[in-house]
Amino acid sequence: MTASRSHEGLWPTLDSPDRPVADQIGLDDFADPASSDLPYMDGHGPGSSSLAQELAPGFDTPSTLQPPTGTTDLPAMDPYGTPSDLRPDATDTPRAPEILEPPVLAYEQGINEFGFEGTCGPTTIANSLNSLFGGSEFSENSCVEAAIDHGLCNVDGEPAECGGTSTSQLVELYREVEPDRIEVERFDFENALSEEQIAQRLENGSVVNIAVDSKTLWGKDYGFDAFSDSVVSDHWIEVNGVERDSTGQIVGFNVVDSGGGTDYVEAGQFHAMYLGTPERMIADPTCIVVSRKA
């Protein structure tokens, strides 16, 4: 099945105007010596003088450090002089990190009621949002439907061409599908993120979409493209993890490729399909970072 990443308008030139640049609480906090209704300090730490005498008989707390007459609302203290409302409580357990359902990811595209097959863009959106939020809330079908409703994909031509999305369309489709919970950033051409920058975004919890040369991704014969030293990307994939060696060097990326089912790409191949090589440059390197809003 041939994936499709259409271009501005649907197939823009590289100088298309529609390609803008990317776009503890401490004790000191509790006890203020200047405050008349807070505990005073004695030789055992914060607390009332009566507690100090109980814990250390014969220790004479200076009268200047005793609480004012009539003070009755001092916090209870433990033997170490810690106010009771600052002590760990068995019922106050730390908030557990959010546990997400395993995401449902599609390694095949063209599964939609419209018969569109070039749907790598909408399918990548569904995969990316499921990776961010867990479960199966988003699907290729729902994203293709939104793209059709809002004029954000190609609807003409052969099935393999229908559903294709330009960079601008993909970014806008994200905002239509999930308008409230995500932030979407676009980086392209000279502002395209490096592999290390992508890795850092992934390690900080984002997912990344990149436009790639599908023939390099799938190891296919370049055909007539073999005579060209520059090609235009033609396929969208999700990148959702990075693998490093013991020295911290990137050795590969975990991906979700709906066009060919690829789930891992080693570092050299990743560079070649995303940025290119001296012999076969990618003319329009593009990536989109998708993050949950704080």
Image (tube, grey):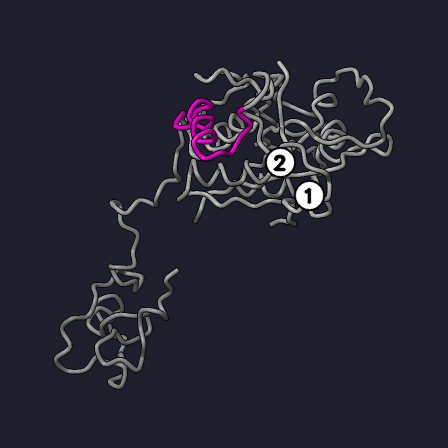
**Nearest the eye: 191 or 153:** 153
**For the point 85% across and 31% down, which residue is it?**
229
The stretch in magenta equals 136-155
Q: Specify few, some or many for label 2: CA neighbours under 10 Å numbering under 14, 14-19, or 20 or more.
A: some
- Considering the numbered disc 1 on the image, is that residue within a helix, a strand or a loop? loop
Question: Is 144 a magenta residue?
Answer: yes
Examine the image and state in which quarter residue 33 appears.
bottom left
On the image, the x and y values in percent for residue 242 come to 63, 33
Which amino acid, mark 1? Ser
On the image, the x and y values in percent for residue 6 come to 63, 30
Which amino acid, mark 2? Gly
Between the residue at mark 2 and the residue at mark 1, the CA separation in whole angstroms equals: 9 Å
**For the point 46% across and 41% down, which residue is it?**
175
**For the point 70% across and 32% down, which residue is it?**
245
Question: Which residue in the protein does label 2 denote?
Answer: 9
Examine the image and state in which quarter residue 225 appears.
top right
Question: Which residue in the protein does label 1 denote?
Answer: 16
Seen in the picture, residue 86 relative to 156 is either above or below; the reply is: below
Q: Earlier in the sequence, mark 2 or mark 1?
A: 2
Question: Is 82 a magenta residue?
Answer: no
**Nearest the eye: 241 or 109:** 109
Is the Cβ of the residue at disc 2 closer than 8 Å to that at disc 1? Answer: yes
